[in-house]
Image: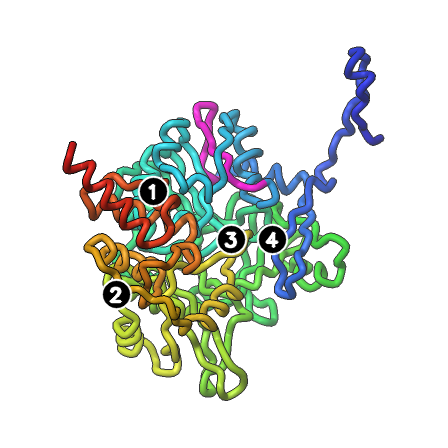
């Protein structure tokens, strides 16, 4: 029976037909994820998958006293935690602006004003916010992050801030229903180049296997396969791709399946998993097999490197590595290269180091490699209308823009957003200016004066007001 809205019955108060009762194996929703071919894949999530996730005892416990921030688009699987986990616990769901809109204001104040106690932040946003103002999260009791590789430095900054709640790193593909593992972060070593993704949630089976689907020894890299209650039905109207990634589970009950994630991990003695990268990212450089994510982890250990992405370029024997680096402070690309040359084999050292303001992400929170390659093509662009900084404020802002945008020879007539700026970087810039200068310039001033010369005038005006006061 299909229930339909009946306006006449609603107006007269006549009895309505009951909604059909859902069976555990019925489809609950279809979520589309990005595909390697550029064609989105529709993942069919069943009711039993959602219930498994919503009531999972190994996720941070919510209670009726919690106020959970709802910031995710309903097409993203993080929405499941915000909605179903909150419903299960009887927590209050608080509708919030989207992440980009949230950082345009004062996210810390907004979280406090709405008395938010629990938040699941996309990893890209978490990394950016923590880099400039880790106290943004100080009012939270539960802070989870997921969707990409979390930076160790970001976790260290949050743990060293006024935040006193539970910090959790979540990992899981949509095909495994939002999250398959969780890791509570209590400390991060100063020399750590990665943060573990943790152990399996209740009802989740994790298998680290070789190419022949045999378990690998502890500490040995292998592809992660996920079994258990979180494994979804498969891909919508795509039986071939479903058969390729949803495999018979030889470790489970008869008829059960496991999902081949394509992610490389290694297992620690305590069962905790370390994420190593993708199994399809290996490339040959000068005859050597190289895993770009290994190079990235090496670069992240360099002081002053906030984030890094390493991509292969070229074909055959001309293939080389290009490193895109987000740096902090005065760290230069020659310094990063020197560090790489002193710590990793020469065939792993990237041929080029390109400073970028951020490692951009797709709408699904994954790395936007196309955007990075486009930046690579434009990195040598020089503008003919260059005007050098003239005032103290223009000189100061030029340095800040160069650090955040990774662009040299900035003209006072340049526009922040035309040079690759975005709301996250504008947030970081406003915080940095307020910290460095005795002026009350805020994010609204940054967004309202995106040309460097105009921003400098706004900074001068703010400083004049401070002096008069």
Q: Secondary structure at mark 2?
A: loop
Q: Earlier in the sequence, mark 3 or mark 1?
A: 3
Identified at 62% across, 54% down, the residue is 33
Residue 318 forms part of the magenta stretch: no
Distance from disc 1 to disc 2, alpha carbons, whole Å, reads 28 Å
Of residues 83 and 402, the one drawn nearer to the viewer in this rendering = 402
The residue singled out by tag 1 in the image is 445
Q: Position of residue 455 (x, y in %)?
A: 31, 49
Identified at 81% across, 16% down, the residue is 9
Distance from disc 3 to disc 2, alpha carbons, whole Å, reads 27 Å
Q: Position of residue 229 (x, y in %)?
A: 62, 45
Question: Mark 3 or mark 1: which is in front?
Answer: 1
Look at the image and tell me whether residue 297 can be seen.
no
The residue singled out by tag 3 in the image is 365
Q: Position of residue 433 (x, y in %)?
A: 26, 47
In which quadrant of the rendered image does the C terminus lie? top left
Q: Earlier in the sequence, mark 3 or mark 2?
A: 2
Of residues 163 and 134, the one drawn nearer to the viewer in this rendering = 134
- For label 1, the crowd category at 10 Å Cα-Cα, with few meaning under 14, some 14 to 19 and many 20 or more, is some
């Amino acid at each position: 029976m299909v229930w339909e809205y009946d306006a006449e019955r609603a107006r007269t108060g006549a009895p309505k037909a009951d909604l059909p009762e859902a069976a555990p194996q019925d489809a609950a929703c279809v979520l589309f994820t990005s595909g390697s071919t550029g064609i989105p894949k529709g993942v069919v999530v069943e009711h039993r998958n959602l219930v498994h996730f919503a009531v999972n005892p190994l996720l941070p416990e919510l209670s009726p006293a919690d106020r959970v921030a709802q910031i995710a688009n309903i097409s993203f699987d993080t929405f499941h935690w915000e909605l179903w986990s909150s419903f299960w616990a009887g927590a209050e769901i608080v509708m919030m602006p989207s992440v980009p809109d949230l950082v345009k204001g004062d996210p810390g104040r907004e979280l406090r004003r709405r008395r938010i106690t629990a938040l699941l932040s996309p990893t890209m946003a978490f990394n950016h916010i923590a880099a400039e103002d880790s106290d943004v999260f100080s009012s939270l009791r539960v802070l989870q992050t997921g969707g990409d590789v979390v930076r160790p430095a970001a976790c260290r900054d949050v743990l060293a801030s006024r935040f006193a709640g539970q910090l959790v790193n979540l990992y899981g593909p949509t095909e495994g229903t939002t999250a398959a593992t969780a890791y509570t972060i209590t400390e991060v070593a100063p020399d750590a180049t990665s943060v573990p993704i943790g152990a399996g949630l209740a009802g989740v089976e994790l298998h680290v296997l070789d190419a022949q689907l045999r378990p690998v020894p502890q500490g040995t890299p292998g592809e992660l396969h996920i079994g258990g209650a979180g494994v979804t039905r498969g891909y919508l109207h795509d039986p071939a791709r479903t058969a390729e990634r949803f495999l018979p589970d030889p470790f489970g009950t008869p008829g059960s399946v496991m999902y081949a994630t394509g992610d490389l991990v290694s297992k620690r003695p305590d069962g905790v998993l370390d994420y190593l990268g993708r199994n399809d990212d290996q490339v040959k450089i000068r005859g050597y097999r190289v895993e770009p994510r290994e190079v990235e982890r090496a670069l992240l250990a360099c002081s002053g490197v906030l984030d890094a992405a390493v991509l292969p370029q070229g074909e055959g024997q001309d293939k080389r590595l290009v490193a895109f680096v987000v740096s902090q402070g005065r760290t230069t690309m020659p310094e990063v290269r020197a560090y790489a040359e002193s710590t990793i084999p020469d065939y792993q050292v990237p041929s080029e180091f390109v400073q970028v303001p951020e490692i951009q992400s797709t709408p699904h929170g994954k790395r936007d490699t196309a955007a990075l390659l486009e930046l690579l093509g434009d990195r040598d662009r020089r503008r003919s209308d260059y005007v050098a900084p003239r005032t103290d404020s223009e000189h100061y802002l030029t340095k800040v823009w160069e650090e955040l945008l990774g662009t040299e020879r900035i003209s006072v007539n340049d526009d922040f957003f035309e040079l690759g700026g975005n709301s996250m970087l504008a947030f970081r810039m406003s915080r940095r200016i307020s910290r460095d200068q005795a002026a009350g310039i805020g994010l609204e001033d940054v967004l309202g004066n995106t040309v460097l010369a105009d921003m400098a005038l706004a900074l001068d005006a703010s400083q004049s007001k401070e002096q008069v006061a």
